[in-house]
Image: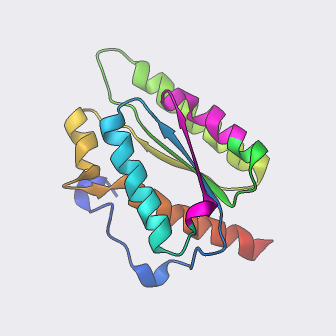
Amino acid sequence: MASAERNLSEYNPERVPNAELFRFGIVVSEYNADITLPLYEGCRSTLLQHGTKENNIRTVYVPGAYELVSGAHQLLHTQSLDAVITIGCVIKGETDHDVYINQAVAEGLMQLNITHHRPVLFGVLTPNTRQQALDRAGGKHGNKGVEVAIAAIKMADLYRQLQ
């Protein structure tokens, strides 16, 4: 469902597992910081709201969306984590740069999911305009950071149940 048809921040808290025992990594792109920082705050506050301890959240910053894969890879190699969340924003421009960046990031994160046997979540906005991004970073369509945090908790719980 398109995010224009629902609020990204709305969910049923009763269907979210307690995250008290989980450890999360968050990789945040500094590019488009006016968008990525509100996404990060939505993500972090949602993890805390569902029981994650402050010291069980490891946050790192990378220059842009392309570097999210490398940042996530490093967290997976250096930290004991239940899931890694990536947060970024690539806005369509005058060239096709967004297509190449988005495809590389999506494929890179998918590879990390497969090779590391831990969830790596795609919290990257891919809007056509800056306004569409702002609408999804705490604006009229809610906050994608909240949505990706809930997905991370659910996936961490699923992986734990299956091991």
Residue 142 in the magenta stretch? The answer is no
Q: Residue furthest right?
A: 163
Camera sees residue 130: yes
The quadrant of the rendering that contains the N terminus is: bottom left
Q: Which sits in the foreground, 13 or 158?
A: 13
Q: Residue furthest bottom?
A: 14
Q: Quadrant of residue 3?
A: bottom left
Query: Where is residue 21 shown, x and y percent of the image?
Result: 66, 73
The quadrant of the rendering that contains the C terminus is: bottom right
Whether 9 is drawn above or below 12: the answer is: above
Q: Quadrant of residue 17?
A: bottom right
x 73%, y 72%: residue: 160
Query: Where is residue 141 shown, x and y percent of the image?
Result: 24, 56
Q: Which sits in the foreground, 126 or 24?
A: 24
x 64%, y 57%: residue: 83
Answer left or right for 87 relative to 93: right
Q: Main secondary structure of the magenta part?
A: helix
Query: Where is residue 107 shown, x and y percent of the image?
Result: 61, 36
Whether 81 is drawn above or below 159: the answer is: above
Q: How many marks?
A: 0
Camera sees residue 147: no
Q: Residue furthest front?
A: 55
Q: Which sits in the foreground, 116 or 22?
A: 22
Whether 115 is drawn above or below 66: the answer is: below
Residue 62 in the magenta stretch? The answer is yes
Answer left or right for 38 relative to 21: left
Whether 66 is drawn above or below 13: the answer is: above
Q: Which residues are magenta?
A: 54-74
Q: How is the image coloured?
A: rainbow
x 73%, y 76%: residue: 161
